[in-house]
Image (tube, helix red, strand yellow):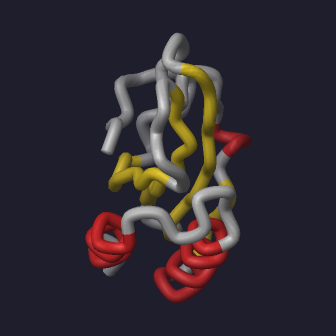
Amino acid sequence: MYGYYGGSISDKFVYVTDVDLSEPSYSFDLLGIWKTDEGYYLSTDSGCSCPTPWESHTDSDLTGPLTAEQAIEEATSLWSGSYGGGYEPEEFAKAIALIV
């Protein structure tokens, strides 16, 4: 988990977690989950080791609002269909458990 360290996503979105979509090798390929009163929001980000994850994302880069069920379905689809093809299933399960 990398975390969210600021950027251009507004404070109305509460960062929940992120999960690696593929094995990091001097790079990152992440699925991030945020929440508001309206529901859950997802986004992906990837890059080399130089940029900070999510630094170029804004509110419009987040997909949502989604219900918990929709967020789990979309996250599972993104995770299983990624280049890593289901990388770190235990970590993914922990991330999904945070969607209540």
Return the residue nearer the eye: 45 or 99: 45
Compared with 59, 82 (above or below) is below
Name the residue at 61% across, 51% down.
43
Name the residue at 62% across, 35% down.
46
In this image, 98 relative to 81: left or right? left
Compared with 46, 47 (above or below) is above
Name the residue at 65% across, 76% down.
77
Horizontal and vertical percent position of residue 78? 65, 67
Compared with 63, 56 (above or below) is above
Locate the C terminus and report the quarter of the image it occupies: bottom left
Horizontal and vertical percent position of residue 98? 29, 71
Compared with 85, 62 (above or below) is above
Return the residue nearer the eye: 7 or 73: 73
Horizontal and vertical percent position of residue 99? 36, 74
Q: Residue furthest bottom?
A: 69
In this image, 38 relative to 99: left or right? right
